[in-house]
Image (tube, rainbow, N blue to C red):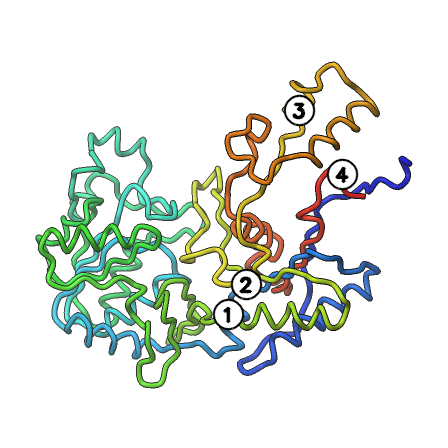
Amino acid sequence: MEQNIRKVGTVSRGIRCPIIREGDDLAAIVVDSVLGAAAAEGFSLRDRDVIAVTESVVARAQGNYASVEDIAADVRAKLGSDTVGVIFPILSRNRFAICLRGIAMGVKKIVLMLSYPSDEVGNELVSLDQLDAAGVNPYSDVLTLERYRELFGENKHEFTGVDYVAYYGELIRSCGAEVEIIFANQPKAILSYADHIINCDIHTRARTKRLLLAAGAKVVCSLDELLNSPVNGSGCNEQYGLLGSNKSTEDKIKLFPRDCRPLVQDIQARVLRATGKHVEVMVYGDGAFKDPKGRIWELADPVVSPAFTDGLIGTPNELKLKYLADNDFKNLSGEALRAAIEESIRAKDANLVGNMAAQGTTPRQLTDLIGSLCDLTSGSGDKGTPVVLVQGYFDNYTNE
């Protein structure tokens, strides 16, 4: 019997694909690439395998692009063209700088309010140790640019080598707008400088907007409310606007993909017709994990997965094997231990919330977990694997 026990659990494979262009039949390319990889590498698809497609190629195939002029026009229409407060942006040349360029092209002056000691996703402007040494309270203190430089000098990003304070200031001026930079963490601090506000935070945007309006802001527009409809024939994202966008060229952004549900269902149906296997399919963006060295929380997209098939709804429902081995079956070993654990897995409840034998398992959405795995597998550079095949994710110790 031992020789029939599977020796491998979850496997994540990056699938190489052709370069995707606007208008391509992405579903056909994904399915052909996965089936071609299976034939070339000698593996077979199984029920509940997961095919994941990065959001970047989905948006590219959709042609979901907009120009900095489109952003500027939308800003002028929604906030006017005088002074606008831009608060809580992330520090990113790829993610936000191109959006900031469009905003600056649409207004006379920007008051840029940066959160500190880091942005929302963990890019650091100043260390906690520096704050302690300076006696600065980030929860209450508002710093001018001059005071920030006096206390902390120049602080270049650990990985990119960019001083984002200087970079964003110069970018705004290069677009013909005036700029004033302050540092604060209370949203209402911006109201001493401007009452037309763009709040650029991602995961806390609803709270920030609520606080600003309650404090007397005249107009508040979150990034998901810019480019949430076409401007001069541009692309858009009805749900997320500029959130999740990336730099395409110096003058153009690629927006987060829109209406991806038909795509994942199409891929699922095509695989079923071709192989008889019922796979799950998802579109994924940034994973949700934190780098312990740089302390950067990766998730700059509004969600890990904007679309997925129904089998990916929910959270894991798993028992902790080491808990069972060390507690319930601490007096067993060998074949008896294996048999007892297998029986516990087969008999487990459909919902293990509150069960001590489930403590320490990861209570996150399946799409967040699998999407993070896929993001790490595909990388963000030149691997050329915008599709990831995950096999065995839903297996457990009893599967042979």
Look at 51% across and 75% down and name the residue there: 60
Residue 339 location in percent, x, y? 79, 28
* Mark sitting earlier along the chain (4/1): 1
Instruction: Name the amino acid, label 4.
Output: Thr
Secondary structure of residue under mark 3? helix
The C terminus, quarter of image: top right
Mark 2 and mark 1: Cα distance apart in space: 7 Å
**Do callouts 2 and 1 mark residues in contact (Cβ within 8 Å)?**
yes
Residue at far top of view: 331
Secondary structure of residue under mark 4? loop
Q: Is residue 1 left or right of residue 318?
A: right
Instruction: Name the amino acid, label 2.
Output: Val
Residue picked out by circle 1:
260
Query: Quarter-wise, where is residue 19 in the image?
Result: bottom right
Instruction: Name the amino acid, label 3.
Output: Leu
Disc 1 residue crowd, few under 14, some 14–19, many 20+, Cα 10 Å:
some
* Mark sitting earlier along the chain (4/2): 2
Mark 2 and mark 3: Cα distance apart in space: 35 Å
**Do callouts 4 and 2 mark residues in contact (Cβ within 8 Å)?**
no
Residue picked out by circle 3:
324
* Discs 4/2, front: 4
Look at 14% across and 56% down and name the residue there: 213
Residue picked out by circle 2:
283
Q: Which mark is residue 398?
A: 4
